[in-house]
Amino acid sequence: MITEIAQIEILPGQEEDFEKAVTEALPFFLAADGCDGVDLQRSVERPSRYRLVVRWETVEHHTVTFRASDGFARWRALAGPHFAASPQVEHVYSVLRP
């Protein structure tokens, strides 16, 4: 299992609209091949900063399959207008799980 962590800076004042856009786009992620769940987290210290956390079976399910899909295009059309900058994305995996 791979976890995608996308740090997303939102234009100030558009946080509520961004959250609504992510809610609307959630079905596109959940229907994507290899997606095992999504979580949106908001920073306490920086309220315009979010982390979108998506669990994928493999990195390729995200970087190849999902990014080439209509669902990805629709996600970006909904959420993209609220971005203050391009999201910073990395993929991680657990090395210790108690």
Image (spheres, rainbow, N blue to C red):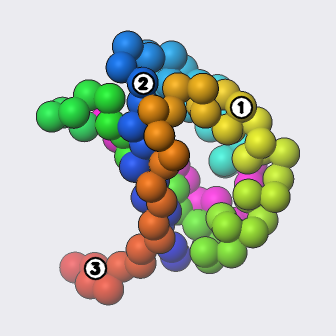
Residue 77: mark: 1
Q: Do labels 2 and 3 touch, CB within 8 Å?
A: no
Quick one: label 2, few (<14), some, or many (20+) residues within 10 Å?
A: some
Q: Residue furthest left?
A: 45
The answer, for residue 39, to whether it is visible in the render is no
Q: Quadrant of the C terminus?
A: bottom left
Q: Residue at x 36, y 79 (%)?
A: 94
Q: Do labels 2 and 1 touch, CB within 8 Å?
A: no
Quick one: label 1, few (<14), some, or many (20+) residues within 10 Å?
A: few
Label 2 vs label 3: CA separation?
36 Å
Closer-to-camera residue (85/97): 85
What amino acid type is highlighted by mark number 1?
Ala
Q: Is residue 89 magenta?
A: no
Name which quarter of the figure residue 22 lies in: top right
Q: Earlier in the sequence, mark 2 or mark 1?
A: 2
Q: Main secondary structure of the magenta part?
A: strand
Q: Residue at x 81, y 58 (%)?
A: 68
Name which quarter of the figure residue 8 lies in: top left
Classify mark 3: helix, strand or loop: loop
Residue 6: mark: none
Horizontal side of residue 49 vs 53, given as left or right? left
The residue at which mark 2 appears reads as: 11
Q: Earlier in the sequence, mark 2 or mark 3?
A: 2
Q: Earlier in the sequence, mark 1 or mark 3?
A: 1
The residue at which mark 3 appears reads as: 97
